[in-house]
Image: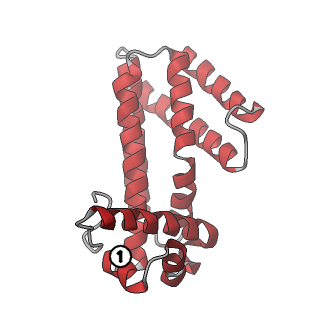
Amino acid sequence: MSTMLADARAPQRPKGHQRVAVILAAAATVFQERGFEAATMTEIAARSGTAFGSLYRFFPSKAALADALLQQYAQQALDGLAALAEQAAGLTSDGLADALVDFALSLQAMRSFAVAVMGSHYGTLDRRAQFRQAVHDGMVLILCRAWPELPGLQASSVASALLHVLKGAAAAAQDGAEPQGPLLTEYRTLTRRYLAGV
């Protein structure tokens, strides 16, 4: 499993991959509910229906489990940005705006976990800075594919502004805003108008 670090043991069989997926889903829920510090491996084992020994066989520590989840989130985000970069040249500015908002909403569940873990002292400033830079670079690539004539410095500024808007859309969804409700419709409109001006 590519999202696991060296101190987490990768499963060898399909059944093991399924077990790890269940453990990761349970861990994400527990970390979101309790925060990284208060979460326990005992509760994660119980929520995932995993024997304690099996949990530790795959993830020898809570930190290893959090690392695997953060890597999974980062990979999902970067893969989504890369996929959008491939499509960007063929999209209208409205189409790209909608795709970006949809992308932000698709990450919302994992994002709330990542914020909970990275907000603790466990999430190092270095790790956060690396992830933010990779996401920023992914957004710049999307913009340069959509508008090849866009100067690099402007693409970087537009990417930063867009990421703040998309963060707001994701936060609104986390607070219970409906995907087609008035608040998220405003975020879509805002993103469309901003990109139309680019």
Residue marked by disc 1: 59
Q: Nearer the viewer, residue 183 or 124?
A: 183
Instruction: Tell me the kind of residue under disc 1.
Output: Phe
Q: Nearer the viewer, residue 142 or 151?
A: 142
Q: Is residue 63 above or below residue 93?
A: below
Q: Residue 87: where, in percent of width, then height?
A: 38, 23
- Taking the spot 53% from the left edge, 42% from the top edge, the residue there is 106
Q: Is residue 119 left or right of residue 73?
A: right
Q: Nearer the viewer, residue 150 or 118?
A: 118
Which image quarter is the N terminus in? bottom left
- Taking the spot 58% from the left edge, 56% from the top edge, the residue there is 112
Q: Residue 45: where, in percent of width, then height?
A: 48, 79
Q: Nearer the viewer, residue 156 or 73?
A: 73
Q: Is residue 79 left or right of residue 34?
A: left
Q: Residue 174: where, in percent of width, then height?
A: 66, 49
- Taking the spot 56% from the left edge, 52% from the top edge, the residue there is 109
Q: Residue 11: where, in percent of width, then height?
A: 27, 68
Q: Residue furthest right?
A: 182
Q: Secondary structure at mark 1?
A: loop
Q: Is residue 95 above or below residue 56?
A: above
- Taking the spot 45% from the left edge, 65% from the top edge, the residue there is 22
Q: Is residue 113 above or below residue 66?
A: above
Label 1 crowding class (10 Å Cα cut-off): few <14, some 14-19, many 20+? many
- Asked whether residue 184 appears in the rendered view, the answer is yes
Q: Is residue 137 above or below residue 58?
A: above
Colour option used: secondary structure
Name which quarter of the figure residue 125 lies in.
bottom left
